Image: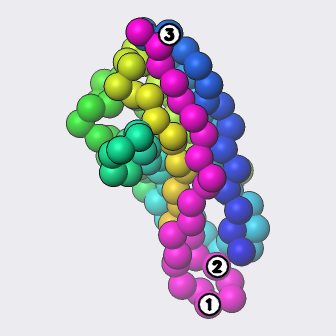
Amino acid sequence: QVQLVEYGGGLVQAGGSLRLSCVASGSIVIINSMGWYRQAPGKQRELVAAISSGGITNYGDSVKGRFTISRHNAENTVSLQMNSLKPEDTAVYYCNVDAVIPMTMKNYDYWGRGTQVTVSS
């Protein structure tokens, strides 16, 4: 079983910054991609940013140039630095990893419980 614990989040004024972190633990052979998704009330969950095991990044169009994703492979950690935040960034942010577990040697998708980010205008 793989557990994801998210840190960070909270309330910030427009133009401010926040940093989210997520730590993966449990029986893990290797983590492939790691990333962040978000879901605002009444909207579908959307990709914010993702990073491959080799460091290749992918960002949602609405956050390009403002958010930066990074990972620390040795610590199974992924972080999201969010700058120039806007009210429309308000959402619950979910950590996501694609990990191979030893029981099956297959990869599965895992999700954190989510952390609230609220940007006031």
Please state the horizontal and vertical placement of residue 109, each as a whole percent of the image: 51, 69
Q: Amino acid at mark 3?
A: Gln
- Given the current orientation, which residue lies at the most extreme front position? 42
Q: Which residue is mark 1?
A: 104
- What kind of element bears circle 2? strand
The chief SS type of the magenta part is strand
- What kind of element bears circle 1? loop
Which of the numbered marks, if any, corresponds to residue 76? none
Please state the horizontal and vertical placement of residue 68, each as a whole percent of the image: 43, 31
Query: Marks 1 and 3: in contact by CB < 8 Å?
Result: no
3 vs 1, front mark: 3
Q: Is residue 12 magenta?
A: no
Which residue is pictured at 66% across the width and 44% down the height? 6
Q: Which residue is mark 2?
A: 101
- Given the current orientation, which residue lies at the most extreme bottom position? 104
Which residue is pictured at 51% across the width and 24% down the height? 118
Please state the horizontal and vertical placement of residue 117, each as a whole percent of the image: 53, 29
Q: Amino acid at mark 2?
A: Ile
Q: Amino acid at mark 1?
A: Thr
Residues shaded magenta: 99-121
Q: Which residue is mark 3?
A: 13
Which residue is pictured at 47% across the width and 19% down the height? 119
Q: Residues within 10 Å of mark 1 (few under 14, many from 20)?
A: few
| Left/right of residue 75 with respect to residue 16 in the rendered view | right
Q: Quick one: label 3 or label 1, which is nearer the N terminus?
A: 3
Viewer-proximal residue, 90 or 49?
A: 90
2 vs 3, front mark: 3
